Image (cartoon, rainbow, N blue to C red):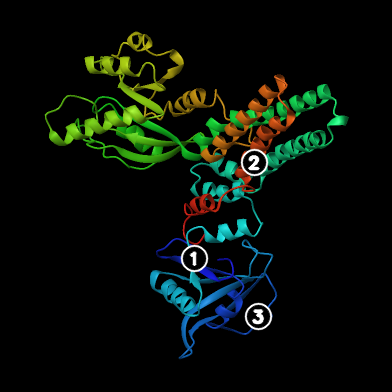
Amino acid sequence: MLNDTIAAISTPLGEGGIAVIRVSGDEAVPLVERVFRSKTKLSVAETHTVHYGFIIEPASAQKVEEVLVTLMKAPRSFTMEDVVEVSCHGGIVSVKKVLDLLLQQGVRLAEPGEFTKRAFLNGRIDLTQAEAVIDLIRAKSDRAFKVALKQVEGNLSKQIKSLRYTLVELMAHVEVNIDYPEHDVEEMTNSFIKSKCDTVMFEIDRLLVTAEQGKILREGIETAIVGKPNVGKSSLLNELAQENRAIVTDIPGTTRDVIEEFVNIGGIPLKLLDTAGIRETSDLVEQIGVERSKTALAEADLILLVLNSNEELELNEIVLMKQLADKQTIVILNKTDLTRKLNVEQVLSYFPQERIVELSLIENKGIEDLEKAIAAIFFEGKLESSDLTYVSNVRHISLLKQAKRSLQDALDANEQYVPIDMIQIDIRAAWEQLGEIIGDSVGESLIDQIFTQFCLGK
């Protein structure tokens, strides 16, 4: 329902300097006015102004909270409706009191993502921009934030709309030839179809090239830190996370479970999994941790195998290297500040030199080399240009691939001189699939599914 007025807390719950309650809808101003007292009435105030006053209990006129109220009148607001934002003291009790009073006036509690959904349904943003709002909130690195920001600004939307316009031109040309076949020059029409389809497919391929990197920037690289007990796995996690996230002792088997932590290395988000040391053990709890480590190993996108350069390789480490030789693995020779006893030639028999990084956490050496090694695997040595439009959303990637297949079907049919009204079906399918990306041709159930992923108040 777009004709009712909704409200939700837009700031995180808990103690803070301020909390913001957002109200949006046709009745936002009069409903807030019922509980707000100030020198200026909101109904006569200018848009985009801030007003000091008090939230009161209407029946008793008792003051409940001291607030600042921001007024944004339609259509100059995020939802393109009248929006009133109430800024009160950041605390659970104060926020609950203000929100309860608003709900008592007939305001409805907003569903997750409903403000952004209204912005989409009211035409302020398209679906790619709406989805990018989630990415903006969840960004785990500066690069991921910049990618999401460009999506919010409409970079991907502009490219998709341009491709759809090219297909509209093509469909119009085909329609004319269907309606007036006596004026059709078959060779020219076939050449025109090939040219336009090739152009759109080329641009789709350019977008898909960024897909893997885009997904990495959006979701992070699932990274398992593995190795035998007491080689420095937890110390590495703590160093990358810049905090004592894992317990570090000289006692083998300290880490009993998989510890997760998001870190940012050179602009690349990693979801680090510090695993229990893989070894044979009679300790039941440690056995469970080792099994979980093996599961994490199987599911990881990247594996950091930590070896102690101050010790000779053990049999289980050699077995582990054999298992990981065909996976995306970087070998970390840790504790290089100590005398080297490890035979590097044995490691080189399983992994190339560029996958081996020497590290000393005590001397703070090797972290930059680790960043370069990760970039070499996932970004061919560097991240792409900052002005590149990344495709990071799985839904977008799937629809781009579907559109490409539809255009390929149209090209195949064109080469076989299939009647153009049949070719038109595939061209229209591609046009509709691209339209689903920006929300021009998408079902209500999908829209609901997308916006339920948002947090409450956004």
Residue visible at 43% across and 18% down?
A: 355
Mark 1 and 2 residues: CB-CB less than 8 Å, in contact? no
**Circle 3 or circle 1, nearest the eye:** 1
Q: In which quarter of the view is residue 3 placed?
A: bottom right
Residue 384: tell me if it is visible: no
- Above or below, 374 relative to 247: above
Decide if residue 336 is on the left or right side of residue 190: left
The label on residue 432 is 2
Residue visible at 53% across and 60% down?
A: 114
Residue visible at 51% across and 40% down?
A: 218
445 and 221: which is toward the camera: 445
Mark 3 and 2 residues: CB-CB less than 8 Å, in contact? no
Rendering coords of residue 305 (x, y %):
34, 23
Which residue lies most toward the front here? 182
Rendering coords of residue 152 (x, y %):
62, 48
Whole-angstrom CA distance, mark 3 to mark 2, is 44 Å
Decide if residue 427 is on the left or right side of residue 176: left
Whole-angstrom CA distance, mark 3 to mark 1, is 23 Å
Q: In which quarter of the view is residue 121 placed?
A: bottom right
Q: Which mark is first along the chain, 2 or 3? A: 3
> At label 2, which amino acid type do we have?
Glu
Q: In which quarter of the view is residue 283 placed?
A: top left
Q: Which mark is first along the chain, 1 or 3? A: 3
- Per the image, label 2 sits on a secondary structure element best described as helix
The label on residue 110 is 1
- Above or below, 271 relative to 405: below
- Per the image, label 1 sits on a secondary structure element best described as loop
Read off the residue under disc 3.
43
